[in-house]
Amino acid sequence: MWLLSPDSRVGAGRSQASFDKVAEFCQKSDDSFWCFEKRLFVLVAALGVCLIRLFLCARRERLDIQPLLQDGTYRLGNKTARRT
């Protein structure tokens, strides 16, 4: 499993690769419908994880933190530091 990508392009590539894996499974599966559906559920869940990570990565890239730093409601540094 991968954590948030360094950028959304990497995340998009991983999401596309996951989708391609699901599409290939759908085209080549010789399983009974019940077995196919059971395996498809797992693959679609993994694809959903990839897409949510892509969304979070893209949001992080677009986040403008400067206004929050200026008004004091957010500060960079030690995450466990106590707020005053």
Image (cartoon, helix red, strand yellow):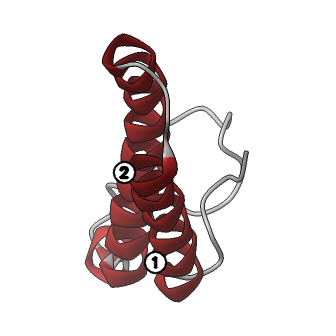
Q: Give how far across and how far down residue 58 sits, in percent.
A: 37, 74
Q: Amino acid at mark 1?
A: Ala
Q: Locate residue 72: give its quadrant.
A: bottom left
Label 2: state its secondary structure: helix
Label 1: state its secondary structure: helix
- Mark 1 highlights which residue? 12
Tell me if residue 75 comes above or below residue 52 in the rendering. Answer: below
Residues under numbered marks 1 and 2 in contact, where contact means CB atoms less than 8 Å apart: no
Q: Give how far across and how far down residue 79 sits, in percent.
A: 65, 43
- Mark 2 highlights which residue? 52
Q: Residue at x 36, y 51 (%)?
A: 52
Q: Residue at x 54, y 80 (%)?
A: 13
Q: Give how far across and how far down residue 11 sits, in percent.
A: 53, 72
The total of numbered circles placed on residues is 2
Q: Residue at x 51, y 87 (%)?
A: 9
State the residue in front, 53 or 80. Answer: 53
Q: Amino acid at mark 2?
A: Ile
Q: Do we see residue 84 in this rendering?
A: no
Tell me if residue 38 comes above or below residue 55 in the rendering. Answer: above
Of the two numbered discs 1 and 2 on the same chain, state the one appearing first in sequence: 1
**Residue furthest to the top:** 34
Q: CA distance from mark 1 to mark 2?
A: 11 Å
Q: Locate residue 1: give its quadrant.
A: top right
State the residue in front, 63 or 4. Answer: 4
**Residue furthest to the bottom:** 9
